[in-house]
Image: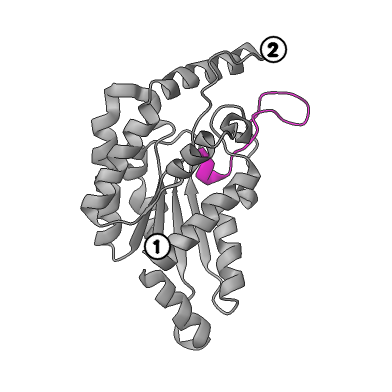
Amino acid sequence: MQIIEKFKAKHETMYNHRRPVIAFLGDSVTQGCFEIFDDHGHIETKFCPEDAYSEKVGHILGMLYPNAAPVIVNAGISGDTSWNGLTRLERDVLSFSPDLVTVCYGLNDAGWGEGKIDEYEKSMRGIFEGIKASGAEAIFLTPSLRSDDTDYRNPVKMLEDCVRQNAKNEREGWLQKYVERGRKAAKEAGVPICDCTELWLTLKAGGVNTNALLANDVNHPSREMHWMFAYELVKTMFEA
């Protein structure tokens, strides 16, 4: 990808090039949301953007190109969907003149089931087209799996209901159906795919309890799993 050429140029001749700008568009996972209980046991989402995969991407690239540490723009918003992301693309992402934009949607979108799968594909296509029209590159980052534990129990009824509802939707295969539509839109737009959904499925097929890798028991990957997203994104930058 051209983003690597930009890192290389900045690293070799610091005064002649600006620092590469990478923007991350997505939902709560992108924003850096983890547990949903505060230190006192009250329901309160923990926002830790410093632990999000965007910062880890910056860390890895800063290690590889110490003279060209990137500018990171975290445009993730908790609860966001692709159709909302499309409406704020210019304001929250393109206004920063990014060199590369990673796009990660599907976790919240899939909850709508059949009702909005066409809108998801249309919105993802619009996002990819908007990014490319701006002159930036794009990567479609497919999301992690959600919990599929339909027997989940928790003293907090609201959380129990939330997990079970998401788990039912997950078992019905809606996330994978949405992600496949996203892949289709990315391929048609010529956008590289960083397929972390497939990696999570590989882990699950290998006997890993992927539900245990979720910080909030629903759909937020643990801080450690954000390293996987970061590594795979940097790998995609080099290989695509």
Q: Residue at 49% of width from left, 21% of height from top?
A: 167
Q: Pointers 2 and 1 in contact (CB under 8 A)?
A: no
Decide whether the magenta segment is chiefly helix, strand or loop: loop
Three-letter amino acid code of the residue under disc 1: Leu
- Taking the spot 27% from the left edge, 41% from the top edge, the residue there is 123
Residue 56 lies in the magenta-colored region: no
Disc 1 target residue: 100
10 Å neighbourhood of mark 1: few (<14), some, or many (≥20)?
many
Q: Which residue is drawn at 39% across and 62% down?
A: 100
Dot 1 lies on which element? strand
Per the rendered image, the range of residues in magenta is 28-44
- Label total for image: 2
Residue placed farthest to the right in the image?
A: 40
Q: In this view, does 159 lie above or below 7?
A: above
Q: In this view, does 177 lie to the left or right of 195?
A: left
Q: In the rendered image, which quarter contains the C terminus?
A: bottom left
Residue 49 placed where, x, y %?
Answer: 61, 48
Which residue type carries mark 2? Answer: Pro
Extreme residue toward the left, this view: 188
Residue tagged 2: 155
